[in-house]
Image (spheres, rainbow, N blue to C red):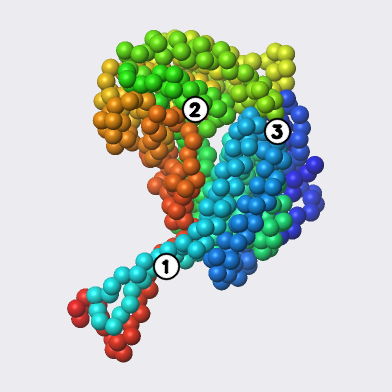
Amino acid sequence: MQLNNYIGGKWQDAGDAKYVPVTNPANGEELAQVRLSTKEDVNLAVAAAKKAQKKWALVPAPKRADYLYEIGRIMKEKKEHLAQVLTKEMGKVIEEGRGEVQEGIDMAFYMAGEGRRLFGETTPSELADKFAMSVRAPIGVVGLITPWNFPVAIATWKSFPAIVAGNTFLWKPATETPMMAYEMAKVFEEAGIPAGVANIVFGSGSEVGTAMIEHPDVKVISFTGSTETGRSVAERGGRHLKKVSLEMGGKNAVIVMDDADLGLAVEGILWSAFGTAGQRCTACSRVIVHKDVKEELESLLLTAMEQLTIGDGMDETVKIGPVINKKALEKIHNYVQIGKEEGATLLVGGEILAEGNLANGNYYAPTLFTNVERDSRIAQEEIFGPVVSLIEVSSLDEAIEVNNSVTFGLSSSIFSRDVNTVFKAQRDLDTGIVYVNAGTTGAEIHLPFGGTKGTGNGHRDSGVAALDVYTEWKSIYIDFSGKLQRAQIDN
């Protein structure tokens, strides 16, 4: 199967386009071939989006929302099919695949509701016989660049608020996971969304992504990916005075205090650290543990990790699937060697798994380090794999200080049964997301998603805050006094 672009409500002909294979990370099987588009393809998509946007912006927001309701209905009907496609191309276990598709369904219905809630403000004027208000206005054509680890959820975080706000969009999915974008194009088509509102252009970041960022008619770029790439996106977009929304890396920590429910903490750590094989921007990469419970927590974690099953995510009994590709395997393994060289104690894991039914996939053993120094590389740099570092502390203040010592600020968590501890932590942890007595993952779509410091640039996906990325505020003054009033001069 060849995956071709969806532009202006039509599937683009193959022509003489180049393609690269899409492979299943669980077994190396080729699933499809995806188009490597060019700058010319981007130009076609922008032209289609620009033409459609003028009419789309005039459609009443509740009517635009109706399309999202239909998209959500279709996704719900096709949930199992979409989840299986997602698991095959990305590798996450099938229950996570279903959960991710559900997140997209939830976002469709939530943002559809915003079609009747695109609120502005009315305010008293300081002058007589004058009315003042603000409204949200669509921006135009927006460009969406999404990663491979959440190939549908993140795309819905970005595209659905853009749609309901009256914009049209181009979406460049990751070349590792283009099949979900292909499936979503079919959903858009079935929902009857007007031609040119949703456009999908496959290809590399260097070619397609760059062309989107530098195109003068693309007014917004929303990017999720690595901090290194995000910095480049911001620099390029800034030169063109575009609005750029970035969601990048994380080095998230679970704090376990001496009064914590250790059984619950272990469950939270395992799910946060090893779900999606650690390939989440919110994954737990550090466990900051009070010295009084460190040994017990280590023992409990090791026992629990023995129960983790590894394999093809399509197997309902498997808890950890493969990582995305060989390059990721090498990066993870390299960080494990760095950890050893830095003097950390490797308790379990630390190896590539390539025997038996794992031989043709990209599997890494769940890995646990202890006695990790807070400023070591494995405690500071994003590994993006199933590797966890235990860092010992002696107080809450020290735990918060260690949590805040990294360059990222996405998600953090604390396990404690002391209300005073909890309230101090939620205030002082410097991340965009804070969990109490839960792991570092599990964000809900009706709250803002994003982080501080090296994780982002102040914008947010999800929740009402996402609308700020895809709208401009317009202030309107209506003077019915019949005379010229000069605001502060005449006041």
For the residues labelled 1 and 2, the Cα–Cα distance comes to 40 Å
Compare residues 271 and 477 and report the one nearer the observer. 271
Look at the picture and state if 436 lies above or below 286.
below
SS class of the residue under badge 2? helix
Residue named by callout 3: 88
Amino acid tagged 1: Val
Residue 141's quadrant in the figure? Answer: bottom right
Q: Is residue 101 left or right of residue 481?
A: right
Q: Position of residue 403 (x, y in %)?
A: 35, 28
- Residue 35's x, y, as percent? 73, 45
Instruction: From the image, tell me which residue sits under label 2.
Output: 272
* Image-quadrant location for residue 40: bottom right
The residue singled out by tag 1 in the image is 135
For marks 1 and 2 on the same chain, the one whose residue lies earlier in the sequence: 1
How dense is the environment of label 3, judged by Cα within 10 Å: few (below 14), some, or many (20 and up)? Answer: many
Q: Amino acid at mark 2?
A: Ser
- Asked whether disc 3 touches disc 2, contact meaning CB atoms under 8 Å apart, the reply is no
